[in-house]
Amino acid sequence: MTVGSQVKGCYASIKSIEASLALLANKTQHQESQQAFQEAKQLISEIKDDLQKHLIHLTREEPQYE
Amino acid sequence: MPDWITVVIKSISLLVILFFMTKLLGTKHMSKMNVFEYISGIVLGGIVAIHTIDPDKNISYAIIAMVIWFVIPFSFEKISLKSKSFRDFTQGKSTVFIQDGKIMEENLKKAGYSTDDLLEKLRDRDIFLASDVEFAVLEPNGSLNVLPKKENRPLTAKDLGIKVAPEKQPQTVIMDGKVIHESLANLNLNLNWLETELEKLNVSLENVFLGQADTNGNLYVDLYDDKIVVPQPAENEMLLATMKKCQADLELFMLATDNDQTKAMYKRNSQKLQKAIDLVEPFLQ
């Protein structure tokens, strides 16, 4: 597996985590846990944006990683 | 009027009176009753027993006696609810046996307790060393309540400084294969959700003996058919594991790259992910 595809796999997992956290934030009954889930979701979505930028950069700079 | 009819009428009428009197006297548990309440209960029953089987006795005597044995304990109870000094008089006061780790010999003697009795009561509470006790008090109902010294108390999450998620009581949503709509509504869930969850577990509603849902929306079921193995919900553990795996991946990428800017990006994000893990970990366990 190339670095590019590894980063892509990680990016996919991050997206799945974000979705799960959003689901939990909606499902839970407690104010406190809802807040924690939402904050975590915010952090994850920042990571997602960074990784996305990096992925675009990777594919453009080094097409052999495709 | 034949005797047997008299017995029937008296039995039924006294039974009805007794039922309402015991209702009014309160629903205190038998063991929580003090001697006075206990005895007046027995006397009420005794009066009814004597008068039902004897047709010659006048029923009005029974009613008068019952009213007296009802009114006095009832008013005692009501007054003791209001007045502290009256309560101390009728129900007795609690006696301190151990204070600040020291045994109060005078109080022990006053309550008629020997050293052996005290040690036996302590052993009842799993305490074999009197010096492990900070405070012990003999309640009016005869039970000894013990506060062990701080270092001998069971460890709690508060002692360890661990953050734990708040937990409300789970709701029973399926009983004997039937959906209980009220408890579903308590959790803000609907029938649609339940059907989806059951489909995920691959079981039919009729086969579920008991189904309970917790506040995180996990469904736990027990089936009529005990041969079928139902997986326990593990979505939360899965999510936590995925988060930890991603965090490890980011650290690996950080080590693998030579570009300083990319290294910094991975480092920043791995730290962010760690922060997110710390944030949600107590709620996912």
Image (cartoon, coloured by chain):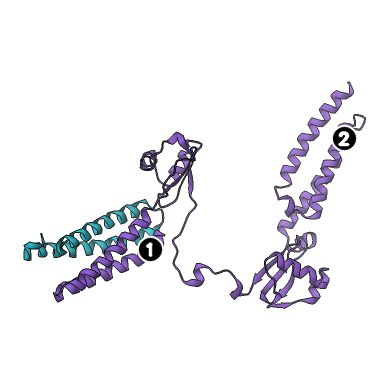
- Percent across and percent down for residue B112 are 83, 68
Q: Residue at x 74, y 50 (%)?
A: B30
Report the side of B158 relative to B127 (left or right): left
Q: Which mark is residue A11?
A: none
Q: Residues within 10 Å of mark 1 (few under 14, many from 20)?
A: some
Chain letter for the residue marked with disc 2 in the picture = B
Secondary element type, mark 2 = helix
Determine if residue B68 is in view: no
Residue B219 drawn at (x, y percent): 42, 46
Classify B144 as above or below B219.
Answer: below
Answer whether residue B101 is visible to the viewer in this image. yes
Q: Which chain is purple?
A: B
Give left or right: position of A21 versus B159. Answer: left
Q: Residues within 10 Å of mark 2 (few under 14, many from 20)?
A: many
The cyan chain is: A
* Disc 2 target residue: B51
